[in-house]
Amino acid sequence: MRYIAVQQEDFDVGDEARRLREIASNVGAICTFSGLVREFQQDAGNRAVSELFLEHYPGMTEKSLEEIVDQACARWQLIGCRVIHRVGALHPGDQIVFVGSASEHRQDAFESAQFIMDYLKTRAPFWKRQSGEEGSQWVEHRDSDELAAERWRS
């Protein structure tokens, strides 16, 4: 079972984990990750963030997320996977992304969730604009995200 969504609406982490748990009797491990909008801009002198606006190309973005999940399913033995990424205007503390992997064994669940998140940060076509007291600016990809994704290339 694979579920991918790009949406403006919030999600419930508990509900999403429960859905993964209910997909099969042989689920032995579920790993979930929920990313939140930070209160401060890390790469800009720790200035306060009032809004993070995410843009995307409908259709292209979902296809990219499906390809990332397909890669994860090819590398690890997954029983289920859920990826939800929000778009539009978000504020500090808001949930922005959910990744959940279900498998028979914990290593597959851990590694696949980490892989999916690393590739979401570096391969998915989202554009982020942070706003605060000093105006707004587009968020650049961070070198640390590229380095994290690099370990999965082989």
Image (cartoon, grey):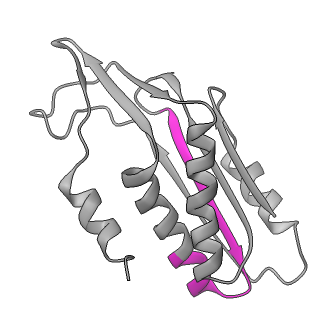
Choose top left, top right, bottom left or bottom right for residue 62: top right
Q: Nearer the viewer, residue 59 or 94?
A: 59
Side of 100 relative to 89 (left or right): right
110 in the magenta segment: yes
In the rendered view, would you say 10 is above or below 15? Answer: above
Where is residue 148 drawn, in percent x and y?
Answer: 30, 67
Q: Is residue 15 magenta?
A: no
In this rendering, the answer to whether 40 lies above or below 76 is above
Query: Considering only vertical position in the picture, is 37 above or below 68?
Result: above
State the extent of the magenta-drawn residues as a range: 94-111
Quick check: 54 left or right of 135? Answer: right
Q: In screen coordinates, is 12 left or right of 142?
A: right
Query: Residue 73 versus residue 39: which sits nearer the camera?
Result: 73
**From the image, which quarter does the C terminus lie in?**
bottom left
Quadrant (top left, top right, bottom left, bottom right) of the N terminus? bottom right
Q: Name above or below for residue 15 compared with residue 93.
A: below
Q: Position of residue 84 (x, y in %)?
A: 63, 45
**Which residue appears farthest toward the left when viewing the image?**
45
Indicate the quadrant where residue 110 lies. Answer: bottom right
Identify which residue, 104 or 140, lies in the foreground: 140
- For the point 34% across and 37% down, the residue is 38
35 and 67: which is toward the camera:
67
Residue at 38% x, 32% y: name it.
127
Residue sitting at x 28%, y 24%: 49
Q: Residue at x 55, y 73 (%)?
A: 112
Residue 107 is drawn in which quadrant?
bottom right
Instruction: Give left or right: position of 139 versus 34.
Output: left
